[in-house]
Image (cartoon, rainbow, N blue to C red):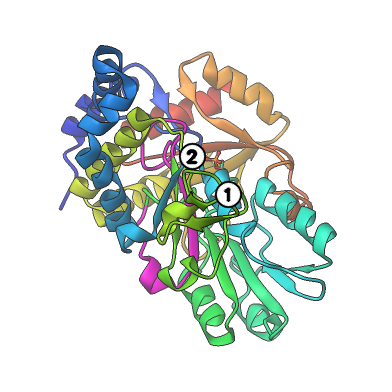
């Protein structure tokens, strides 16, 4: 199925008078998503927020089904949280680690994840093992196989890094985890919404993602998938009435599904927006979205490479819609500001985002331009002309 470009752009007022290549930061919400959020806020204002939640309970329950369809799991395996970091934390901090345990990760691990690994390693005496890259720049599967033994309790992998077009081979990593019995936590913040994701095929125990990026949902949304085989085994890092009931004076009972990782107080308006954004993506089809994002990403890389002094830095055998580049003699911040002044939205990627990768490759801060299916070939042409004129 091909995407009706005119229709999706008509639904996206933000792309009418600016070039939005910051979909890896936050994409533009389609109109039906904004309308869904506003409708619920207005209902809260009109009849009361608790009463609005009751009135919309069926629609709220449907959000779990939408998340489940998006990543191919059961709705009972979904916890709604306010961003990917909280989702990732809820899983990671519930995994019991002790001195001598090993956590295996890759070079593209996201800053907050790696700092959490450092925190827990220091607290428990567990050890972090960073696997190198292969010739394509993705996690080296041979090294991974060689280094995962019975001491490895967790493999923590970022599927698509915040600072590059790399798509790590999550399914192959899942196979290694499955063969060795290590738990597998996948940070899919930058991949869900731009490509098909199937947790059954990947074989991960946990997947964390956010709403505002390639799913095109509002800020302040995210979700965690926890495999049914892990839910009963794991105690959430914080106990509260969202995930448990105070069933006796000296005890409590955790919820039986992934909701044990949730908090009680949430924005139902935003959650409904998340559900609407996922339904919008499912209607377009994740295969169609992926095909278009990949082809726009490749075109942008080709056109940027043709500009004198511009170097594209994306790694991986498979590359996605995130494109990172530098221009000789031009620092990223100045280029970012020059583009912003022309209503062109991009972001910068700095060593603070993925320090191991930056240090390994001796990279300077880069411009991150990230495309989505509603972007056009014409925008890529105009973007590259603007970069050329500025540098
Ligand atoms: C790979 C990756 N993981 C995690 C996060 C954190 O997501 P959130 O800001 O929704 O917590 C980001 C955000 O940029 C990211 O790129």
Q: Name the residue under label 1.
A: 239
* Residue 239 shows in the view: yes
Q: Which span is picked out in magenta?
A: 195-221
Q: What residue lies at 22% left-to-right and 52% top-to-bottom?
A: 285
Task: Give residue 313's position: percent from left, percent from top.
Answer: 61, 49
CB under 8 Å between discs 1 and 2: no
Crowding at mark 1 (Cα within 10 Å: few <14, some 14-19, many 20+): some
Question: Is 208 in front, or is 251?
Answer: 251
Question: Is 110 in front, or is 227?
Answer: 227
Task: Give residue 288's position: percent from left, percent from top.
Answer: 24, 52
- In the rendered structure, the answer to whether residue 346 lies left or right of residue 298 reads right
Q: How far apart are marks 1 and 2 (CA)?
A: 32 Å
Mark 2 close to ligand 1, CB under 8 Å: yes
Q: Is mark 2 on a helix, strand or loop?
A: loop
Task: Give residue 221's position: percent from left, percent from top.
Answer: 44, 37
Q: Mark 2 points at which residue?
A: 24
232 up-or-down from 191: above or below: below
């Amino acid at each position: 199925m091909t995407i009706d470009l005119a229709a999706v752009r008509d639904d996206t007022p933000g792309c009418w008078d600016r070039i939005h290549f910051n979909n890896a930061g936050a994409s533009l919400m389609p109109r039906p998503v904004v309308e869904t959020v506003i409708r619920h806020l207005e209902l809260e204002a009109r009849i009361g927020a608790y009463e609005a939640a009751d009135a919309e309970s069926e629609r709220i329950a449907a959000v779990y089904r939408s998340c489940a369809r998006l990543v191919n799991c059961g709705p009972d395996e979904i916890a709604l949280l306010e961003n990917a970091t909280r989702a990732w934390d809820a899983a990671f901090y519930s995994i019991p680690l002790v001195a001598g345990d090993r956590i295996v990760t890759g070079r593209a691990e996201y800053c907050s994840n790696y700092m959490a690994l450092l925190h827990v390693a220091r607290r428990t005496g567990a050890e972090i093992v960073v696997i190198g890259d292969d010739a394509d720049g993705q996690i080296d599967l041979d090294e991974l196989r060689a280094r995962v033994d019975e001491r490895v309790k967790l493999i923590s992998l970022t599927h698509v890094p915040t600072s590059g077009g790399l798509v790590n081979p999550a399914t192959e990593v899942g196979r290694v985890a499955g063969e060795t019995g290590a738990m597998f936590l996948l940070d899919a913040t930058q991949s869900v919404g731009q490509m098909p994701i199937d947790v059954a095929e990947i074989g991960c125990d946990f997947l964390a993602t956010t709403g505002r990026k390639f799913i095109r949902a509002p800020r302040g949304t995210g979700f965690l998938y926890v495999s049914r085989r892990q839910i009963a085994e794991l105690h959430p890092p914080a106990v509260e009435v969202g995930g448990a009931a105070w069933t006796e004076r000296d005890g409590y009972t955790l919820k039986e599904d992934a909701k044990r990782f949730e908090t009680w107080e949430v924005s139902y308006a935003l959650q409904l927006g998340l559900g609407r954004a996922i339904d919008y993506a499912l209607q377009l089809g994740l295969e169609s979205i992926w095909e278009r994002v990949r082809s726009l990403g490749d075109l942008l890389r080709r056109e940027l490479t043709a500009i004198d002094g511009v170097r594209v830095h994306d790694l991986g055998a498979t590359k996605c819609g995130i494109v990172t580049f530098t221009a000789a003699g031009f620092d990223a911040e100045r280029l970012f500001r020059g583009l912003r002044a022309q209503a062109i939205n991009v972001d910068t990627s700095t060593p603070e985002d993925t320090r191991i990768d930056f240090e390994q490759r001796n990279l300077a801060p880069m411009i991150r331009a990230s495309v989505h299916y509603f972007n056009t070939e014409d925008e890529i042409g105009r973007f590259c002309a603007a970069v050329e004129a500025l540098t």
